[in-house]
Image: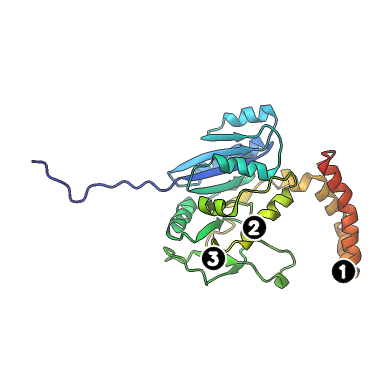
Amino acid sequence: MAVLDDNPPTSFEPPLVSVLFVTYKRPELLTEALLNFKKNTDYSNLELIVADDGSPREVQEYIRGLPFDKFALGKSNRGLGANNNQGMNAATGKYILMIQDDRYCVGPNDYLAKAVSLLEANTHVGLINFSGPEHVRDDRVLLSGNESGEFYAIQLAPIEMVTKRDYLYTDMPHIMTRAAFEHVGPYREDRDMERCEDDYMKRWEHQTQYATVINGKCHDQVFVNVGIPYSFRETRLRYRVDSFLQPIGKRLKVGSPRLFVVARFLVRLPVRMLEKLRIVR
């Protein structure tokens, strides 16, 4: 007669994490971002996805040769919001880890396992930022499974305490629950990167169902930014103009704030019109 084991072995597979790499015309950076992620991330149940915003055919052919599980490759350049959305639509994981192609993972290797464990224990947490401002600690949000005290919720600093508004959501590396993404909705599909980002930041800030958390022990250390020299923000015309006029702007802002606002509008308006017409970038 067979003897039944009172304690049969159990196998636990952690929830699926869709890792979404967002890219455009930077295949070398993307390759290194993927390799560094795989080297420095200790998590067993991953779905690797790349979302490309309509890079030239030869670039997309190169991307198809990389070891991703899914390829969300746009046929034309439609902007950051559309690229994020096509990547999100391809993802099937309970959690989505978003990484831009110029962010290299350096560990510690258990950062993702710890983040998923916290999300599993706290359904009211919708977003964990790995990079960006730390904001203000919010002890009103209680976190289960956080005996070490590494994680804590954050809130916005009062607007009068900061010179520039920092939002809870950031497009820098972060992990979001699928439930939270569906609650807030897809990204605004606009060729203007800033409008897309600002819209999502505001929508995330105004929703009250999900908290935002960081790991205070390794925040801003898991991923490093290697793409500043290649950054779209640094090379596009509006930022070159802003950089050139910055010394004048600072003096004008102190001496005549109203004139500064008018002058900034008159400078940026024609530049943005040229960008919209795709005459310059």
SS assignment at label 3: strand
Query: Is the Cβ of the residue at disc 3 closer than 8 Å to that at disc 1?
Result: no
Nearer to us in this view, 268 or 239: 268
Q: Quadrant of residue 101?
A: top right
Residue 63 vs residue 222, the one in the foreground: 63
Residue wearing tag 2: 203
Specify which label sits upstream in the sequence, 3 or 1.
Answer: 3
Q: How many marks?
A: 3
Q: CA distance from mark 3 to mark 1?
A: 36 Å
How far apart are labels 3 and 2 at the CA level?
18 Å
Location of residue 141 with respect to 117 vertically, above or below = below
Label 2 sits on a secondary structure element that is helix
Q: List the residue tagged with mark 3.
A: 153
The picture places residue 188, in percent across and down from the top left corner, at 68, 48
Which residue occupies 48% across, 45% down?
A: 93
| Residue 33 in view, yes or no | no
Could you classify mark 2 by the number of other residues whose Cα lies within 10 Å: few (under 14), some (14-19), or many (20 or more)? some
Amino acid type of disc 2? Arg
Q: Which mark is residue 223?
A: none
Q: Is residue 190 left or right of residue 68?
A: right
Residue 174 % position (x, y): 57, 52
Image: 262 above or below 99: below
Q: Quadrant of residue 262?
A: bottom right
Disc 3 or disc 2, which is closer to the eye?
2
Q: Residues within 10 Å of mark 1 (few under 14, many from 20)?
A: few
Q: Residues within 10 Å of mark 3 (few under 14, many from 20)?
A: many
Does label 3 or label 2 sit earlier along the sequence?
3
Q: Residue at x 87, y 66 (%)?
A: 253
Label 1 belongs to which residue?
254
| Type of amino acid under label 3 | Ala
Disc 1 is placed on an element classified as helix
- x%, y% of residue 265? 87, 56
